[in-house]
Image (cartoon, helix red, strand yellow):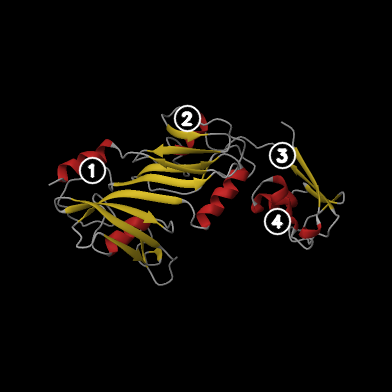
Amino acid sequence: MEATICNAVVPAESEGERLDVFAASLADVTRSRAGALIRDGRVTVDGVAQAKAGFKLKAGMAVRVSVPAAAPATAQAEDIELNIVYQDADLAVVFKPSGMVVHPAAGNETGKLVNAMLERLDNLSGIGGEIRPCIVHRIDKDTSGLLLVAKNDMSHLSLSAQIKAHTVQRAYRAIVIGGFKQDEGTVEGPIGRHPTDRKRMAIVPNGREATTHWTALERLRGATLIEARLTTGRTHQIRVHMASIGHPVLGDPVYGPKKSPWPVQGGQLLHAYRIGFEHPRTGERMLFEAEPEPRFTEWLNRLRM
């Protein structure tokens, strides 16, 4: 495929704008991608390649951006079953089962969600110059549920901005240890790496702001079914926050008690059941929900009074 060429004359309202910002908007790519195109000599101003991303534009200048065809993905497509809840030319919503890792890692590059998506999703047009899907938020390996996937730079840019602005609606179901006197509450505490155990997260003074809202949905035998809604999306956020108030997620091998009263296998009983967002191209508000896996439902039924 040939490169996509985007041309525009700088309007008066863009006087003084940085070249990378203008080029990103012109070519519907992320600002970092625009910066890479500038460094590669693929962005010209009045016919001359401009190497400075921070070059200030003047009204009337002609900007040309050449976006090369996306290269093949570095990860390999694999014929792995994948539950695609929704997809169109710009994005997809997929169901990740518990136990599946999202991204390949060095020395462990197969059997991951990305491998499955490369095989199963259609119309992948490239993120950052590579033909690949981009998961714009994460859920842990042993957490099941819905993930939002961008198929192109335009979608990636829009969905990432929505997450940063806290307008993406994300809700989880979890079975947590213990009962609550109140029906709802909020946990606030900055989350960062544990000071002595780098594999764990913790509430630490220099951590990133994090807020979790929870609602008790059903009182169980020694446990509670809750809904947790995220204002922020930090690593292990729900698991850390609920453990911090004495109600760790049942089955959590990291933040739960060393000796659990229930022999839960397969990790924490945590499920990302709802996601809502604005479609990057149409502006339509979209909302998706998914029921938890049988493992979650089986434990819920076992603990009902």
Q: Is residue 102 visible?
A: no
Q: Which residue is mark 3?
A: 68
* Residue that lies at the very extreme toward the top in this rendered image: 79
Q: Identify residue type, mark 4.
A: Val
| Residue positioned 78% across, 63% down in the render | 16
Q: Position of residue 3 (x, y in %)?
A: 74, 37
Q: Work out whether mark 2 precedes mark 1 in sequence or the reverse, and give the earlier one.
A: 2
Pick whichever of labels 2 and 3 is earlier in the sequence: 3
Residue placed under numbered mark 1 in the picture: 265
In this rendering, would 169 be left or right of 262?
right
Find disc 4 in the rendering and name its residue: 21
* Label 1 environment density (alpha carbons within 10 Å; few <14, some 14–19, many ≥20): few
Depth check, front residue: 295 or 142: 295
Position of the N terminus, as image quadrant, is top right
**In the depicted view, which residue is nearer to us: 125 or 254?**
125
User: Who's the residue at 28% across and 46% down the image?
Assistant: 267
Q: Nearer the viewer, residue 140 or 157?
A: 157
Mark 1 touching mark 3, by CB under 8 A?
no
- Secondary structure at badge 1 equals loop
Residue bearing mark 2: 78
Q: Earlier in the sequence, mark 2 or mark 4?
A: 4
Are dots 1 and 4 in contact, CB under 8 Å?
A: no
Q: Tell me the amino acid under the disc marked 1.
A: Gln
Alpha carbon separation for disc pair 1 and 3:
47 Å
Which residue corresponds to the image point at 65% horizontal and 53% vertical from the top-left?
A: 32
* Comes first in the chain, label 1 or label 3: 3
- Under circle 4, the secondary element is helix
